[in-house]
Image (spheres, rainbow, N blue to C red):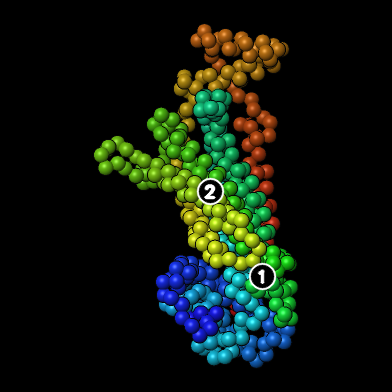
Amino acid sequence: MKLWDKGFSTDSRIEKFTVGKDRELDLLLAPYDILGTIAHTTMLSEVGLLPKEDLALILPELRKLYAKAEAGEFIIEDGVEDVHSQVEFLLTEKLGDLGKKVHTGRSRNDQVLVDLKLFSRAELEKTVLKLQALFEALQERSEECKDILMPGYTHLQVAMPSSFGLWFGAYAESLCNDLEVLRGAWKVVNRNPLGSAAGYGSSAPLNRRRTTELLGFEGLDYNVVYAQMSRGKTERIVASALASVAETLGRLAYDCCLFNSQNFAFIKLPDELTTGSSIMPHKKNPDVFELVRAHCNRIAAAPEQIRSICANLPSGYFRDMQMVKEVYLPLFAELDDCLDIAAYAIREMTVNKDIMSDSRYQYAFSVEEVNRRVAEGVPFRDAYRQVGEEILAGEFRYEGELHHTHEGSLGNLCNDLITKRFNDTVSSFGFEAVHECCRRLTE
């Protein structure tokens, strides 16, 4: 079945090539296509384009289809081109000519636009919740390990004293920035393109503000040409936000691989979180973090893939956009899996509590000694030279205590303020208001 059928057949090879992976990928969009159709038909009835008695028959059937899609029971049959066609086919099969009325004032172009917006909005919420779980794991470990020292590095050379509290907490605060980037992507996603039709609007007296309200969008993509132009751009913006999270997660994974090695031995994964070698009996490999790193690198490349597909397209719709779905739709599940496994591994790993007693890290305290002498009145540059000469002579020793008290330092992690910043940003998304709109449409 094709919504554009005009009474002639398409070459089977052409059909297979042009449909591509739509039947498979569109299953992810099915609940949102139905949700958009519920809002659209409700609006059509309110503006007088669909009799109320027709709406009373259509809505129950759409809600049944929505429940099936939510339960993972919705299928796109062989010979049906995409999710939009399948929904209309099922309605027509059940209701006859009534099912043919739901497309009034719409194009598949604005259908897929609203489907992608609703899908992205729902998936961003899931990702934020996964991000929150990792954030909480990092903050808990930061507090638990705040007094356990480890060396800090610059240029991979021993630099200054750090702590596991600082290390875990650094990645938690990095997630704060990533969350704010996700919030920006959410604002782009949370605007309604429905009613833009094929990109040039409709002569039907549509009420686009009403569908915006029904679907819980913050506002409209006003200009109908831009609404169509946003296809590809919106996906790239969201993919860039996901890539920001992936960058943080990939860097954390790299640290964990490095620090888990025997040469560092700063952390240790439980045996059950490692894999072995088929030839070396002693091996316990951190494959979990190596794979997180690889997945995150792939996610980080997605915005450029999307940009390459859409580069230099003029205004209007082009079938090139179909290929964006293949890159974009799987990104959320891939990142969410990485966030899940990272949170689990962070909670389960153990840390080495006696790293800094090793003599190889003695020079990490050189700045502490410089600052001690400065506090006694020695000019900084003279104290620096004195300590440098002692290091060259092999005579440097530091037996003092650490006095780091400023915000964000060893003795003052500011975890409470970082947590507040994170939680305030989560609250600003307004997930519950969206849930309420969706409940009204589907119940």
Q: Is residue 277 left or right of residue 129?
A: left
Please tell me whether mark 2 sits on a helix, a strand or a loop. helix
The x, y position of residue 264, in whole percent, is 44, 30
Q: Residue at x 68, y 34 (%)?
A: 407
- Which dot, 1 or 2, sits closer to the camera? 1
Whether residue 89 is visible, yes or no, is: no
The x, y position of residue 340, in whole percent, is 49, 53
Rounded to the nearest angstrom, the CA distance separating label 1 from label 2 is 30 Å
Mark 1 and mark 2 lie on one chain; the one further toward the N terminus is: 1
Residue highlighted by disc 1: 199
Local crowd size for mark 2, using a 10 Å CA cut-off: few (<14), some (14–19), many (≥20): many
The image shows residue 42, relative to residue 255, as above or below, that is below
Closer to us: 358 or 205 = 205
Closer to us: 360 or 60 = 60
- Mark 1 and 2 residues: CB-CB less than 8 Å, in contact? no
Local crowd size for mark 1, using a 10 Å CA cut-off: few (<14), some (14–19), many (≥20): many
Residue highlighted by disc 2: 300
Q: Quadrant of residue 388?
A: top right
The image shows residue 402, relative to residue 125, as above or below, that is above
Q: Residue at x 49, y 37 (%)?
A: 255
The image shows residue 124, relative to residue 268, as above or below, that is below
Q: Residue at x 47, y 28 (%)?
A: 354
Image quarter where the C terminus lies is bottom right
Whether residue 78 is visible, yes or no, is: yes
The x, y position of residue 436, in whole percent, is 65, 70
Q: Is residue 381 left or right of residue 154?
A: right
Q: Residue at x 70, y 12 (%)?
A: 379
Q: Amino acid at mark 2?
A: Ala
Q: Amino acid at mark 1?
A: Gly
